[in-house]
Image (cartoon, grey):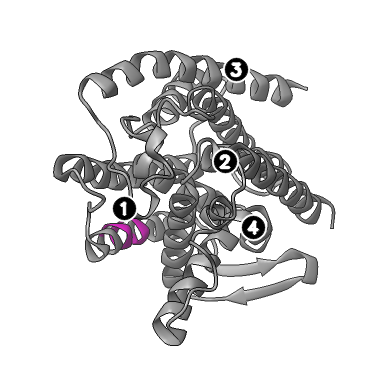
Amino acid sequence: MLVLAKAMLALMIGFILAIGSGLIIIPIMKRKKMEQSESIFLRGQHDNKKGTPTMGGFIFIIPTILTVIILLFMNKLVWSNNLFIIMFVFLAYALIGYVDDKLIIKRKNNVGLTEFQKIFAQLVVSLITFYLLMKSGHEAQLYIYSLNIKIHMGWFYGIFLLFILVASSNAVNITDGLDGLAGGLSMIVFLALGLITWNTSWLAGHQDIAIFCFILVGSLLGYLFFNTYPAKIIMGDTGSLSLGATMAIIAVLTNHEVTFIILAGVFIVETLVCIIQMFSIMVLHKKIFLMAPLHHHFEKLGYNERDIVKSFWVVGLLLAMLGVLFAVWL
């Protein structure tokens, strides 16, 4: 019950600070005209979003950091190497996203960091993360619990870590195209990860990592107060890259990489649609979908934005429940 009370306290503080952050950050972003340029492919369809400020990720990033500090000072949270690794990835990817957003705003187009610059920055972060993981005693292996299979990967684990961090961060980034979509799905995934980590008793500091997940759930809930339709702010790469990478590193630390495929099912499908669309255009010279990613395909079919978001949330919630069942019970 004590852990549950801590989790509720963490969620509540994260939520309250996120609401407060939103009330401060949004007027500042508007005044400084921190707006992301509209994609040429969505002109006429998302005209109502013109002038919406970006970098909304700060609304849940800053409260999450502050809540962690508050709980540490209250002795409700214990600092550990694993929690440090999570915080490092959380902030490092936020920094990469911030630089990308800043360049997009400065250039007044949708061109920020080049693909090479992004990959290079993420390679540096993944190498540091790999070093921290090995130093903390994390085993370089893929463990499939349900089949009791252990795949020892050695130094190849570093490449695997880079792949999962890059894939997850960019999957959330791709999904961030409709009001409340990426934020709501991320909140659901972190809630599931919190429950799964809570049950990972062999992991040093597992309860504190679970509480971190609940802090982020509260902060994201506060962010959604401003981001649901009609959005007053969008998270930008600052938020989406940070969220995706943080999900991935928690899955890695808890040895639930396979479970993560279920939890992040919607993000994965969104990414696969983009890959299939690109392949089809390059090889077959025709489109399979009206537009990629998938949420824009449904928009082109005439579905209402709010209905698409709610439907994706429902699918995400069902996958999260299935993921928790798979990780904790099976």
Identified at 48% across, 72% down, the residue is 277
Looking at marks 3 and 2 on the same chain, the residue that comes earlier in the sequence is marked by 3
Residue 83 shows up from this direction: yes
Cα distance in 3D space between marks 1 and 4: 28 Å
Q: Quadrant of the N terminus?
A: top right
Determine which residue is flagged by label 4.
Answer: 265
Is 293 or 114 nearer to us in this picture? 293
- Circle 3 residue: 12
Which amino acid lies under the numbered mark 1 shown in the image of this protein?
Answer: Ile
Res 40 label: 1
- Quadrant in the rendering for residue 94: top left
Q: Position of residue 43 (x, y in %)?
A: 36, 47
Q: Amino acid at mark 3?
A: Met
The magenta stretch spans which residues? 121-127
**Residue at figure coordinates x 66%, y 39% from the top left:** 310
Earlier-in-chain disc, 3 versus 1: 3
Closer to us: 119 or 285:
285
Residue 73 visible in the displayed image: no
**Image marks 3 and 1: residues in contact by CB distance under 8 Å:** no
Instruction: Give the residue type at disc 4.
Output: Gly
Residues at discs 1 and 2 in contact (Cβ within 8 Å): no
